[in-house]
Image: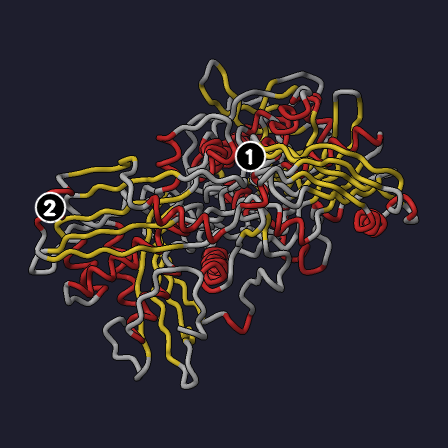
Amino acid sequence: MPKILNKIFDNEPKLTVDRRNFLRMTSLSGVALVLGFSSKGGKKELYAVGNMADSFKLSPYIIIENSGKITLMNPKPDMGQGTFQSVPGLIAEELEVSLDKVTILQTSGEKEFGMQVSGGSYSVRGNYFELRKVGASAREMLCTAASNQWKVPVGECYAENAKVFHRPSGKSIGYGDLVETASKLPVPQSPKLKDPKDFKILGKNYQRPDVPLKVSGKAVYGIDVEVPGMVFASVEHNPVFGSKLVSFDDTETKKVAGVQQTVKFQRVIGKNKYDAVAVVADSYWAAHKGRLALKTKWDNAGNDKFNSKDYEQSLRDLSKKEGLVVHTQGDFDKSFATAPVKLEAFYETPFVSHSPMEPMNCLVSWTAADAIEVWVSAQGPDLVKDELAHTLSIPRDNIKVNIFFNGGAFGRRLYPDFATEAAHISKAVGKPVKLIWTREDDTQLGPFRPLTFSAMKAGIAKDGSPVAFQHKVISPSIDATMEEKRNETGESSNMTEGISSQQYELPNMKNEYVFSEFPIPLAAWRSVTSSTVAFAHECFIDEMAVKAGKDPMAYRLDVLLKKDSDTKKLLKKLKEVSKWDRPLPKGWGRGVAQYEFFAGLSGHVVEVSTLKGGGIKIEKVYAVIDLGTVVNPDMVALQMEGGATMALTAAIKNGITFKGGQTEQTNFHNNPIVRINEMPEIETHIIADGGATIKGVGEPGIPPFAPALANAIFNATGKRIRRMPFDLNKV
């Protein structure tokens, strides 16, 4: 996966914070039990704090005050995927408190919380046992405190609804009345976790506490924030990637009422530095209007010759070259050369934009010469801190980041270039600056999901079984467009995500990666490169089945998956819920696909029908996701539906193209997403068998959708689709 996502999996709490400063930050009063992880000598341990007069080193997730108020810290920003409920829910389940009775606070990049990034479908699976352990330890301490106060065996005490009860007598006492005593007790390092059959929150369709806020308009997103004395900024960026600003004339700009000044600076995103001019005004509309009046002159330096048509042809030419071998087993070359049946195909996928509903924005105030405060929608406060500290050359500890609900992100908000822009402008004007990108900025400036082209080969025996298989990916690299130094091994792994780790039993395999230079920043997009390579991989598996004269589902289950595996279990479930063997009406077709990668495993069966006037209608989608353990089934279904929406958009809408060195698309009119009337019925099924491996939710629902759709179209029409996007009305 891209280098930035590697940080997400480093979830170990690192350092500590001064307790007095933390308590001041959270406005506690009186005695409090603050419980969380701390690191001593490299060993992670649980700690509790009681007496507020003392100074301790701690890393708190639970704060229980003597007033009875309970606060749970959420280290994973919510971008619509439900971490505002699911992550604190891990603690609340073991603590025996209801989420509607607690206050949830978002962390702000404090080092004691470790990596606080939402991405990689890692928020729950990366914290499932550790945060339950935090809640269980607090529960045991409170029960012990009650047993000591009542002078009864602790085994006779149990916790429920933020109280401890004595089973024989029925008497109870609230957590707030136990805080002082509990905070002085040793913290259990190996607390007993609840049996899943006793869960009240986890595994249930529990109401999300953020939904009432969002429905009522009370939820605060970064774009909503205001602070005293702030001004607004709108930025004119270079239209051609890599062009240099020769001059600008702000004469007409300064005539716009409300415009205060203009600021020249550079947008920094990874290794890329782009000239820009900000218009600063006392309102956003004045800033935007002033920007429209700005006259700029650019030196394109030949960068305006870049275009999608020529670039795509260069990838087709590169496909004929040998690539870097990313996986090999057996002897592919010999087996393919001697195979009685040979099959080859070439697949193409497009660039796409992230296009979250909330465009990029950030509010920054310089509080001192080398200290700033930030208010932002981002996928990780620590990412913002790291980027600002590096770009602005100020101490990381001098940066305070306030994180708010994200109005969508999909990987875009892993890259806080817009935050550094706001910081540069704020420093120049000496005031708090709220920068807001337009939808056009968001669409045209990237970074974008990379395209991938795939050259596929297979050798098939006379009985239809596979004897050789190759998936060669030809594409640019995300990391290469962002990092100064290339790492071929890392690039090849990132850009061939999952192609060598499918559980299909394919002998004599040789998968390759061919790198292509690309002049525009690329970024992780929901499910990263699995969203593209899965299209080629699973469509080609279908081509193999057809060549072998086999049913695509049976070919996967009986030929490619002889041994038991999670993939076989998932496909059997798909076959069952979709009633795969049930005859379809005339003119209908069905297709299947699955994909497993770092985030998890899911699969789809898509049913389509041919229309009398031409074209295809998607009738129904069956989705199965293998989780092992589920936190909120309703949220899983919503994530699968959201994934299908994005996957369908990438499959049938035009995507991003380049001409004259710049992005051709500007807004939703020419970079559309699917509408409600275009969405089919989606029926989601969850495999939650309590397996030891907990898998992700947010991303796995994307990769299998497009190939399942394309395979269904072939089944209905006999037309094989090998290029995305494709037009359902013209299939």
Look at 30% across and 53% down and name the residue there.
537
Residue beneath disc 2: 335
- Of badges 2 and 1, the one in the foreground is 2
Q: Quadrant of the N terminus?
A: top left
Horizontal and vertical percent position of residue 532: 40, 51
Residue at disc 2, secondary structure: helix
Judging depth in this view, the residue of 613 and 132 nearest the camera is 613
Residue 116 disc label: 1
Look at 37% across and 66% down and name the residue there.
709
Q: Quadrant of residue 540?
A: bottom left
Residue at disc 1, secondary structure: loop
Judging depth in this view, the residue of 630 and 406 nearest the camera is 406
Alpha-carbon span between mark 2 and mark 1: 48 Å
Mark 1 crowdedness (10 Å alpha carbons): few <14, some 14-19, many ≥20 = many
Q: Quadrant of the C terminus?
A: bottom left
Horizontal and vertical percent position of residue 43: 44, 19
Q: Is residue 401 left or right of residue 123?
A: right
Horizontal and vertical percent position of residue 108: 64, 33
Mark 2 crowdedness (10 Å alpha carbons): few <14, some 14-19, many ≥20 = many
Q: Is residue 442 left or right of residue 614?
A: right
Q: Say whether disc 2 or disc 1 marks the residue closer to the N-terminus.
A: 1
Q: Amino acid at mark 1?
A: Gln
Q: Amino acid at mark 2?
A: Ser
Q: Is residue 184 visible?
A: yes
Q: Name above or below for residue 359 compared with residue 245.
A: below
Horizontal and vertical percent position of residue 450: 46, 46
Residue 687 disc label: none
